[in-house]
Amino acid sequence: MPRIEEMYAFVAEDSGPDDEGVVGINTGSGWMPLVGADMARVESLKPIAREIAARTGQKIKLLHFTHREELGGV
């Protein structure tokens, strides 16, 4: 698996334009955030994000993050 250098995330406005949260789905085994490290994954998540937006009426944005900073291990 290649090193992750960038991330994409589907983000919804929460209570205002400056209040956001990562969109997720319940998989039955727990919550999975709608994030990906490549466009193939992002494309596979787009229909899910669209469905959530239509069902909830929330504005969902796709954000691209490009700065990597390692903060340590667990």
Image (tube, grey):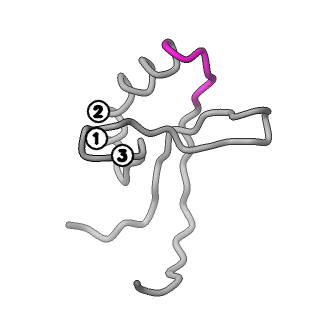
The residue identified by callout 1 is 40
Q: Is residue 8 left or right of residue 15?
A: left
Residue 27, how many percent across, how many down? 28, 38
The residue identified by callout 3 is 32
Q: State if disc 2 and disc 1 touch (CB < 8 Å).
A: yes
The residue identified by callout 2 is 44
Quarter occupied by the C terminus:
bottom left
Q: Is residue 69 left or right of residue 38?
A: right
Residue 69 vertical placement versus 59 (above, below): below
The disc labelled 2 sits on which kind of residue?
Ser
Residue 53 vertical placement versus 14 (above, below): above
In the image, the segment drawn in magenta is: 55-60
Structural crowding at the residue carrying mark 1, measured as other residues with C-alpha within 10 Å and reported as few (<14), some (14–19) or many (≥20):
few
Residue 47, how many percent across, how many down? 36, 22
Q: Residue at x 68, y 42 (%)?
A: 20
Q: Residue at x 37, y 45 (%)?
A: 31
Viewer-proximal residue among 52 and 64: 52
Q: Residue at x 78, y 34 (%)?
A: 17
* SS at badge 2: helix
Structural crowding at the residue carrying mark 3, measured as other residues with C-alpha within 10 Å and reported as few (<14), some (14–19) or many (≥20):
few
The disc labelled 1 sits on which kind of residue?
Ala
Q: Residue at x 42, y 17 (%)?
A: 51
For marks 1 and 2, give the CA distance: 6 Å
When asked about the image quadrant of residue 73, the answer is: bottom left
Q: State if disc 3 and disc 2 touch (CB < 8 Å).
A: no
Q: Earlier in the sequence, mark 2 or mark 3?
A: 3
Q: Is residue 57 magenta?
A: yes
Residue 5 vertical placement versus 14 (above, below): below
